[in-house]
Structures are given as C-alpha cells and as structure tokens.
Image: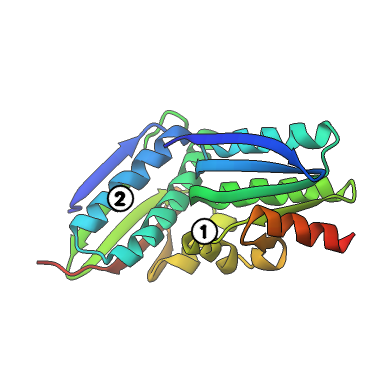
Amino acid sequence: MATVEVSFTPLPAHVRTARLVATAVARRSGVDEALLDEVRLAVGEACSRAVEAHRLHCPAEPVRIALTDAAGRFEVEVTDDLDRGLGLAVIAGLADDVRISETSGGISITMSWPAHCA
Amino acid sequence: MDLKLDHHTKDGIEVVNVEGEIDVYTAPRLRELLIELVNNGYYQLVVNMEKVDFLDSTGLGVLVGGLKRVRAHDGSLDLVCTQERILKIFRITGLTKVFGIHDTVDEAIAARKAEK
C-alpha cells in the first residue's frame, strides 16, 4: 500500500499541488536534498502527461498518483494513456530508475529514487 | 509562486523577464506574450530566466515555439540562465545546442550584436 495517495481533477492548475506533495513526501522519506529537484520535475512531467490524457479521453476521471516509501526507495507511480513526448524524455533523464509498463487503459510510469529510511 | 512576466527594450532588443514557475498551467501565458511580441514586430528577443524556480517540458516547448516564430522573421531568441537546476533540463533534452544561453542580459545582447 502506498504511503501517500493523491487524486485530483485533471486540470493543469493542480499539477503544481501534485509536485509539492511528492516533493514533501520524498523529503520525509529521506531522499537526498540534491535529488529533490529531480523528483519535483519528473513527477510534474508525469502528472502533466496524465492531465493531458485525461482531458482528452476521460475529463471526469481524477488523476491518481501513489507515493511509496519502502525498502530504502521512494517510488512514484502515475498512470496515463499517452505513449510519447518530450515529457517522457525529461523523466528518463531525471529519475534514477524508470519503468514504463502497459496497462489496460494506457501506460503506467513508475520511477524511484534512493531514500535513507530512519 | 505564480508566474510573473514583464518586458522592456534594451539596445534594440526586447528583454523578457520571467519570474516564478513555468509549467503546464502557467506556460500558456508566456506563449501568449511571445506571440504578442512577434506580432508587434519584436524579432530579437532575450528571455531572462534568472528568477525562474521551475521549468518543465511545457515551458521548453513554449521557448522552442518562440524561437521558431522569431526565426521565421530572421530573428533570434537567446536565454539568460546560470541556475544549474534549470540548465540541467536544457542539457538532458539536448536544447543547449538550440538556444544561445548566456550568464547575463548584457552578455546576451552583446553576443547578439556581435553576430550582426
């Protein structure tokens, strides 16, 4: 089960909120300060993609992100149904570990960073 | 932190000061300003990003779009940025080869004048 889950109406204005929450949870999970900028940007990119996809295909569906702090890793999962774009290139350049998997509705991006749990 | 935009003419070049966060929500305002400037005949632009706290791919797209518009008029769009967290985004996307990136507004203007 995720440490923190956020779901929000697919509006661009809420992407900033998702970034702030993800950064706060990452900090709390012990992710190094130097990596927080990467978490902020990668989560923002993943959420922007999801917002765009939901607005096109399912505007009534909230975007969900799951933030998990486990086994020395801080993991973020965002699901959307777009498959390409500059955003993905940015994410791939930032996150320490990125897994992109097919789901029934589209694709799911899971990314993680090392965390030093107390 | 929202996005603050202002612009002024210096040595015949339009300097756009950007402050705050450029993301999927705020980038459309920067896009509109760049389009407005080009429509009003300003084709030599310097975008000062020194007070930008956050930039995502939407913001990169707007800057690339601005560059494309000014180039259609033989113009230029140079950037001012020394912040490592922002420069890194240009590097990982290969856009450091596309934009002239300078340390100060004066340097950006001088480099542009020297090219003429």
Horizontal and vertical percent position of residue B72: 88, 47
**Do marks 1 and 2 both belong to one polypeptide chain?**
no
Q: Mark 2 points at which residue?
A: A22
Q: Mark 2: which secondary structure? A: helix
Crowd around label 1: few <14 · some 14–19 · many ≥20 (10 Å): some
**Foreground: A25 or A51?**
A25
Horizontal and vertical percent position of residue B65: 72, 47
**Foreground: B89 or A74?**
B89
Q: Mark 1: which secondary structure? A: helix
Residue A106 seen in the figure = no
Tell me the quarter of the image containing the C terminus of chain B: bottom right
Q: Mark 1 points at which residue?
A: B86
**Foreground: A70 or A60?**
A70
What amino acid is labelled 2 in the image? Answer: Ala
What amino acid is labelled 1 in the image? Answer: Ile
Crowd around label 2: few <14 · some 14–19 · many ≥20 (10 Å): many
* Residue at 47%, 52% in the rendered image: A45
